[in-house]
C-alpha cells in the first residue's frame, strides 16, 4: 500500500489541519484496521473497495463514488478488484497534535 500526502494546511478551525492524500491498495490487499482523529471525506478514483467496520455493516465503494468516515471509526479498506490497484483520494480534518492514522491489530 502507498499513502502519498498531497497537501497539508491549517484549517479555519483552531488546532485543526486539512490533509489530503492519495491512497493506493494493490490487488488482494487491505489497509489494515485503523482510524483517524477527524472525518475522512473520500472519493474512489479507480477500482472497488469493501469498507469494513468493527461497529457497522461493510459497504462497497466503486470507482466514481464518494464516502465519508466519522472520526475515531475503526475501518479497513479492502481492494476487492481482481485485476487492478485501487486508488482513492482522501481528505481529513485532523487534529494538529495527533497522528493522522492509528493502526490496530
Image: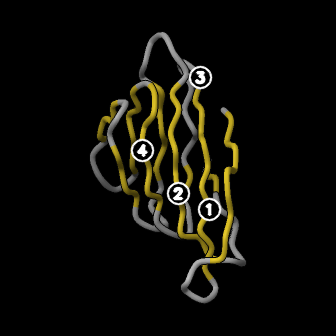
Q: Position of residue 57 (x, y in %)?
A: 27, 46
Q: Nearer the viewer, residue 95 or 6?
A: 6
Residue depicted at x 38% and y 34%: 50
Residue depicted at x 52% and y 44%: 89
Give whichever of discs 2 and 3 has the lower sequence position. Answer: 3
User: Can you identify the residue that label 3 sits on?
Assistant: 26
Crowding around mark 1 (Cα neighbors within 10 Å: few <14, some 14 to 19, many 20+) is some
Residue depicted at x 40% and y 64%: 70
Asked if disc 4 and disc 3 are in contact, CB closer than 8 Å, the reply is no
User: Can you identify the residue that label 1 sits on?
Assistant: 19
Crowding around mark 2 (Cα neighbors within 10 Å: few <14, some 14 to 19, many 20+) is many
Q: Which mark is residue 91?
A: 2
Q: CA distance from mark 1 to mark 4?
A: 14 Å
27 on left or right of 103: left
Crowding around mark 4 (Cα neighbors within 10 Å: few <14, some 14 to 19, many 20+) is many
Give the label, 2 or 3, closer to the camera: 2
Q: Which mark is residue 43?
A: 4
Asked if disc 1 and disc 2 are in contact, CB closer than 8 Å, the reply is yes
Amino acid at each position: 500500500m502507498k499513502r502519498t500526502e498531497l497537501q497539508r494546511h491549517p484549517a479555519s478551525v483552531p488546532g485543526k489541519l486539512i490533509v489530503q492524500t492519495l491512497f493506493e491498495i494493490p490487488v488482494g490487499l487491505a489497509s489494515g484496521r485503523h482510524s483517524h482523529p477527524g472525518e475522512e471525506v473520500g472519493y474512489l478514483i479507480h477500482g472497488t473497495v469493501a469498507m469494513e467496520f468493527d461497529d457497522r455493516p461493510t459497504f462497497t465503494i466503486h470507482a466514481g463514488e464518494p464516502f465519508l468516515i466519522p472520526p475515531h471509526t475503526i475501518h479497513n479498506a479492502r481492494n476487492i478488484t481482481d485485476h487492478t490497484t485501487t486508488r482513492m483520494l482522501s481528505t481529513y480534518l485532523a487534529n494538529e497534535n495527533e497522528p493522522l492514522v492509528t493502526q490496530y491489530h
